[in-house]
Amino acid sequence: MITVENHIGKITVSNRYLTDLIWNTVTGCFGVVDMNAGSFFEDIASRFRRRTESGNGVVIKVKNNNLFIDIHMSVTFGTNLSVVVNSLKHKVRFVVEEAVGITVSKINVSIDNMKC
């Protein structure tokens, strides 16, 4: 849970909401094929789940009302990686800051796979 206090009052946002918001934003970007599990253990655990979870591939950390977001994804072969990553960072930062009102300090994007 992330709590933000401002002049209006206190706002509490769940991690599930943020991961779903980021997941939907990333999968809607040009060139992104799929989201990947963040680590080896998450990859093994995701293979045993019956359904694909929408939060897969997004890791959120909060320190001093600042968000740190890690994204693991697969991209389409032949796309310009730097353009896709920069576009994705700007889009995720804008969507999260508009929806929640908390500052996104850093977004780390890892391209784990390329698909045809």
Image (cartoon, grey):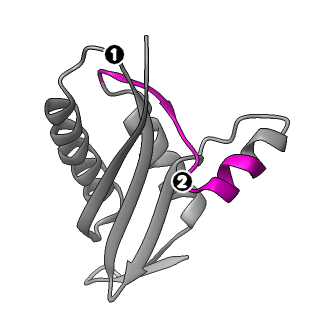
- What label does residue 21 carry, if any? none
The part of the image, by quadrant, that contains residue 106 is bottom left
- 93 shown above or below 4: above
Measured as percent of width and height from the top left, residue 22 is found at 42, 47
Q: Residue at x 61, y 41 (%)?
A: 54
Residue tagged by mark 1? Answer: 77
Q: Amino acid at mark 1?
A: Phe
Measured as percent of width and height from the top left, residue 34 is found at 50, 29
**Residue 10 visible here:** no
Q: How crowded is the residue under tag 1: few (<14 C-alpha within 10 Å), some, or many (20+)? A: some
Q: How crowded is the residue under tag 2: few (<14 C-alpha within 10 Å), some, or many (20+)? A: some
**Residue 8 visible here:** yes
Residue tagged by mark 2? Answer: 38
Segment colored magenta: 30-45
The part of the image, by quadrant, that contains residue 16 is bottom right
Is 14 left or right of 68, judged from the image as shown? right
Q: Residue at x 77, y 51 (%)?
A: 45
Is 81 left or right of 20, judged from the image as shown? left
Q: Residue at x 22, y 50 (%)?
A: 94
Measured as percent of width and height from the top left, residue 63 is found at 36, 85
Count up the numbered dots.
2
Is 69 left or right of 91, judged from the image as shown? right
* Quarter the N terminus occupies: bottom right
Measured as percent of width and height from the top left, residue 87 is found at 18, 36
Q: Residue at x 23, y 47 (%)?
A: 89
Mark 1 element type: loop
Mark 2 element type: loop
Is 93 left or right of 21, judged from the image as shown? left
The question of residue 27 being in magenta is answered with: no
How far apart marks 2 and 1 lie (CA) works out to 21 Å
